[in-house]
Amino acid sequence: MKIIIPLAGFGSRLRPHTFSRPKPLMNVAGTPVIGHVLNMFKDMEVEEFIFVTGYMGDQIQEHISKTYPNTNVRFLEQQQLDGQSPAILLAKDFVNGPVLIGFADTIVETDLATINTATDEAIAWVKQVPDPRRFGVVVKNSDGYVTQIIEKPESMNNNLAVVGFYYLRDSQMLMSAIEQQINNDTQTKGEYYLADAMQILLDQGLKMQAKEVEIWKDCGKPESLLETNKYLLEHGHDNSPQVQVEGFVIVPPVNIHVDAKITNSVIGPHATIGADCIITSSIIKDSIIEQGAQIEDTVLTQSLIGRYATVKGKSSTFNIGDQSEVGFE
């Protein structure tokens, strides 16, 4: 089986950080988002990963090639960012047979390895959400099969949201549906969403199961990125027992890079500190501090501090991008 991972978007909800790097390379609990996504597939029989890049795709390709040198990967470029379906269609000539589609800002906990022996025609992974209006949602019949997928519904009546993962036994059937979608100019809010291509297949009689995931974490906005960081630190990514603590205090769970320099400070809970950070006389909790940032005489909470940024002398919540400088007397 092959896995298609679209990651061409601008990541505009994570600006200013995504002005200088793509969203999949944001650090969460000590690992880039794309690393957590790929880790979900470690128990699966994967023939090839197909990454569809676009915005700052060179950074993604460099990272994946360097970090996963023994993984069979292919990179395709989406030059016109007009939706999910055109991105997936780029892989048409490179897939034949079963395919899994997973979006790069979604981390789920479920047994994906069951796909290795799956007999279903198609599977959509779903999760109940309080407000479904910014997601795609599924409607099921009495037999449990999906009959309808609605992208960004206006109604609150159905809250079973698709978490960004689909499996299809016949990948070329999906490609044909996408071509039909584009030929008919079937768009939602100005974009070609994958949900509309899936609806074409459902209308043609596709039998799609809906499987609910235990955990679904989103990395698309600052607040959700911090919430995902908190969850991951609480579930296996706390490295505080391995940190050499000299001259500062740790309140677990945290993830502190071995090359960070910390003095006279309190770190945690739920703080991620990147490589080469210099932190002096500060308190940091519920925050992500990226590589090379300098924090001095500061109390930070619920903050995202970009690479090589500097923050001095203020107690606050910040969301500042790479190489920024914030100082207070």
Image (tube, helix red, strand yellow):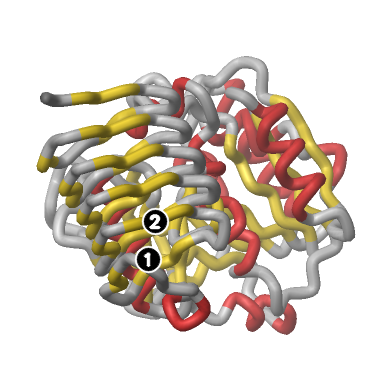
Horizontal side of residue 24 vs 49, given as left or right: left
Q: Amino acid at mark 1?
A: Trp
Horizontal side of residue 34 vs 64, given as left or right: left
Outermost residue toward the top in this view: 80
Q: Which mark is residue 262?
A: 2
Residue in view at x 33 percent, y 74 percent: 253
Q: In this rendering, is residue 187 above or below 213?
A: above
Residue in view at x 67 percent, y 28 percent: 57
Q: Position of residue 279 (x, y in %)?
A: 35, 48
| 215 or 281, nearer to the observer | 281
Q: Quadrant of the N terminus?
A: bottom right
Callout 2: 10 Å neighbours few (<14), some, many (20+)? many
Q: Nearer the viewer, mark 2 or mark 1?
A: 2
Disc 1 secondary structure class: strand
> In this rendering, does residue 309 appear at all?
yes
Horizontal side of residue 61 vs 165, given as left or right: right
Q: In this rendering, is residue 267 above or below 199?
A: below
| 50 or 204, nearer to the observer | 50
Q: Are marks 2 and 1 in contact (CB under 8 Å)?
A: no
Q: Position of residue 13 (x, y in %)?
A: 33, 31
Q: Which residue is mark 1?
A: 216
Q: Earlier in the sequence, mark 2 or mark 1?
A: 1
Residue in view at x 19 percent, y 43 percent: 298
Label 2 – label 1 distance at C-alpha: 33 Å
Q: Amino acid at mark 2?
A: Ile
* Residue 167 position by quadrant: bottom right
Q: Position of residue 218 (x, y in %)?
A: 37, 54
Residue in view at x 84 percent, y 58 percent: 71
